[in-house]
Amino acid sequence: MDSRSARKHQAILDAATTVFLDKGYSGTSMDDIARLAAVSKQTVYKHFADKEKLFAEIVLATTHRVDAMVDLVADIPVEADALDENLTRLARQFLTALTQPQVIQLRRLIIANADTFPELGAAWYEQGFERVLATLAATFRNLSDEGLLKADDAMLAAHHFAGLLLWIPVNRAMFQGAARSGEADEAGDTGEASEATEAEVDRLAAAGVRAFLAAYA
């Protein structure tokens, strides 16, 4: 793909991401995408055979974002005196990354279309969040081997850790969003989700780690 074609390809992906998140899958047309990308509809079809393939590419392209989170989770130091501090720092970064407005919007969009594209939803979960959980479980297993945690089921412990952190802010954002005029789209979105404030992230991180260590330390 030459540079000009590559630029058009990326412009289409960027435009499609914006429109899908704003209008949902069924509410989006290839005309909408072409207009925002400033290309012809024929150019869109030249790069992507149909709307379904374009939707799949933008959804799966987001899974690379978890690479930094995987690296972060894998690098928790084995330090008895600093376990609370290290887990709290991880918790803050975990919360910050997973409560970004676009992440919440994408989550809504995938859930809204899970019955239509079940394989796509499964792939997004397996290549994204589940990969983070698997790495977190391996880290907890290592910490247990060193006597810093007592996690007989490391994967369950990883789910508990994530749940303690994300249950409140993600559920609130999923159900509430941020008010805007007009009817909600098919994804149940009433606007962009509000990103958690720094103070709220600190509070949830500290409370989540405290509860986790009460069960697993």
Image (tube, grey):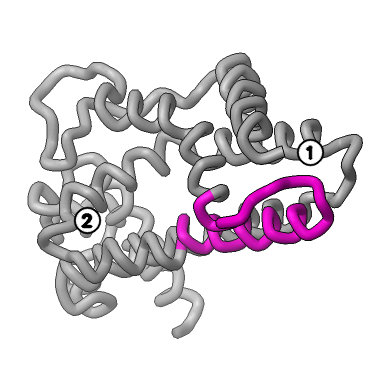
Q: Mark 2 falls on what kind of element?
A: helix
- Local packing at callout 1 (Cα closer than 10 Å; few below 14, some 14-19, many 20+) is some
Say which of 198 and 215 sits in front. Answer: 215
Q: Quadrant of residue 171?
A: top left
Q: Can residue 44 be seen in this view?
A: no
Please say if 172 is above or below 130. Answer: above
Q: Which residue: 18% across, 57% down?
A: 114
Query: Which quadrant is the N terminus positioned in?
Result: bottom left
Verify whether residue 165 appears in magenta.
Answer: no
Specify start and end residues of the magenta stretch as a single range: 128-156
Q: Name the residue that disc number 1 marks.
A: 86
Find residue 135 and name its label: none
Say which of 21 and 203 sits in front. Answer: 203
User: Disc 2, disc 1: CB below 8 Å?
Assistant: no
The residue type indicated by label 2 comes to: Ile
The mark closer to the camera, 2 or 1, is 1
Q: Where is residue 38 in the image (x, y as percent from the top left)?
A: 28, 56
- Estimate the spatial distance between the alpha carbons at disc 2 and disc 1, rounded to whole Å: 44 Å
Find residue 33 and name its label: 2
Q: Where is residue 177 in the image (x, y as percent from the top left)?
A: 29, 25
- Local packing at callout 2 (Cα closer than 10 Å; few below 14, some 14-19, many 20+) is many
Q: Which residue: 37% across, 55% down?
A: 14
Q: Is 132 left, or right, of 62 in this rendering?
A: right
Q: Which residue: 73% across, 35% down?
A: 89
Q: Main secondary structure of the magenta part?
A: helix
Q: Mark 1 falls on what kind of element?
A: helix
The residue type indicated by label 1 comes to: Asn
Query: Which quadrant is the C terminus positioned in?
Result: top right
